[in-house]
Image: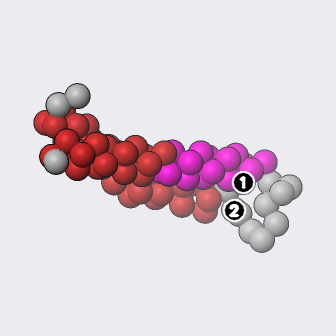
Amino acid sequence: MDLETLKEKLQKLRAELHRLETVGAEEIRVKRILADMGDDYRENEGAKLVMDQHNLWFVRKLELKREILSLKKKIIAGKT
């Protein structure tokens, strides 16, 4: 890939990460409130589903950060 394509892809990934960290986090927060998550959520099926979604959200966030770092390294290597 050329340098401009890498920069465009990096910009898209950063926008997706920003959306995930803002809108996605707020959605999870609201769902946690609506599921009435107390100290012991193991008996609450709705709370279990929210925690599963939270875990998937966290994994996706880490994957995006890894992709962004990888692209940054490729861009830096391409400039030299």
Residue at point 48%, 50% (across, down): 61
Outermost residue toward the bottom?
Answer: 39
Query: Which numbered tag is attached to residue 28?
Result: none
Q: In the drawing, does residue 57 fall left or right of residue 79? A: right
Q: Secondary structure at mark 1?
A: helix
The residue to which callout 1 is attached is: 47
- Disc 1 marks a residue whose amino acid type is Ala
Residue 59: where, in percent of width, then height? 56, 48
Nearer to us in this view, 69 or 16: 69
Nearer to us in this view, 56 or 36: 56
Query: Which numbered tag is attached to residue 36?
Result: 2
Q: State yes or no: residue 49 in magenta.
A: yes
Q: State yes or no: residue 53 in magenta.
A: yes
Q: Which residues are magenta?
A: 45-62
- Disc 2 marks a residue whose amino acid type is Asp
Is residue 80 visible in the rendered image? The answer is: yes
Residue 14: where, in percent of width, then height? 30, 49
Nearer to us in this view, 2 or 65: 2
**Mark 1 or 2, closer to the camera:** 1
Give the Cα distance between marks 1 and 2: 7 Å
Magenta span: predominant SS is helix
Badge 2: residue crowd in 10 Å (few <14, some 14–19, many ≥20) = few
Residue 78: where, in percent of width, then height? 19, 42
